[in-house]
Image (tube, rainbow, N blue to C red):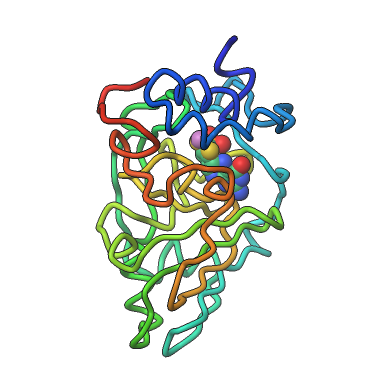
Amino acid sequence: MVLGLFGLGAAGILVGKKVQSGVASVLEPITSRDPTGVSQLIPGSGGFRIYAELGSPSRTDAAYTLKVDGLVERPATYRLDDLRRRLPQTKLTKDFQCVTGWRVPAVKWQGVKLSDVLADVGVKPGAQALRFFSFDGGYTETLTMDQARRPDVIVAHQMLGRPVTQQHGGPVRLYVAPMYGYKSAKWLERIEVVASADPAGYWEGLGYDVDAWVGRSNGRTDQGIG
Ligand SMILES: Nc1nc2c(c(=O)[nH]1)N[C@H]1C(S)=C(S)[C@@H](COP(=O)(O)O)O[C@H]1N2
Ligand SMILES: [Mo]
């Protein structure tokens, strides 16, 4: 079976069986998922496989907004220009690693640290987590407040040294450098600051770890996969 053809579901099972039987049993129900459209290797995607579990929506730069609300002092709706210019810019060069094993080394990213976004809106006492929503209409992710404040977690408007393309989740996606790719929600349209991140995100509902640290989650104990 070729990893790339079947994407996260089938590959997750291969990995799970190989690494740890406990994980395999958690991942088992994923076999029943329809594997079509999960992943395709496309030219020009810089070695990435394109995932669009719940559709691949488009939004023009002019129409794009990112709403930040919930337990914040100053709820905000950012336009792309705010994210590109008004808020402080952060550049990172870091790997992107999918839990199924593929990795793209030394990807150039640019955007706004999530911690800078949180400073801009002001986090209210009692806020413990963040929930991320995609304009594909259904993909969600979560981070704890401590994870969100790491310097290597950004709201990215550039990836591979250019504006994030539509297929990669542009104009704006999340990039959570220390965690597997499923945390890096594409087509980001809303961040809700919440007291608790329960229920967790889309893949977590299918058995994947909420804390998706590369090399030490989902049954992995290694660093050198892919
Ligand atoms: N909205 C949305 N975001 C998503 C996904 C998805 O299917 N939909 N897949 C995730 C997974 S499993 C991975 S590995 C990366 C893949 O990013 P890419 O499609 O730019 O390669 O996006 C993540 N973010
Ligand atoms: Mo992934």
Q: Quadrant of ligand 1?
A: top right
Q: Position of residue 174 (x, y in %)?
A: 46, 53
In the displayed image of the protein, which residue is found farthest to the top? 1
Instruction: Classify residue 10 as left or right of residue 138.
Output: left
Query: With respect to residue 19, does 28 lie above or below?
Result: below
Query: With respect to residue 38, does 171 lie above or below?
Result: below
**Looking at the figure, which quarter contains the N terminus?**
top right
Of residues 17 and 62, the one nearer the viewer is 17
Of residues 13 and 11, the one nearer the viewer is 13
Residue, x 33% and y 22% (percent of image)? 225
Residue, x 59% and y 24% (percent of image)? 10
Residue 209 visible in the picture:
yes
Q: Position of residue 63 (x, y in %)?
A: 68, 64
Residue, x 53% and y 62% (percent of image)? 132
Query: With respect to residue 149, does 26 lie above or below?
Result: above
Residue, x 37% and y 20% (percent of image)? 226
Where, by quadrant of the figure, is residue 188 drawn?
bottom right
Query: With respect to residue 143, does 99 lie above or below?
Result: above
Residue 169 visible in the picture:
no
Q: Position of residue 147 (x, y in %)?
A: 31, 60
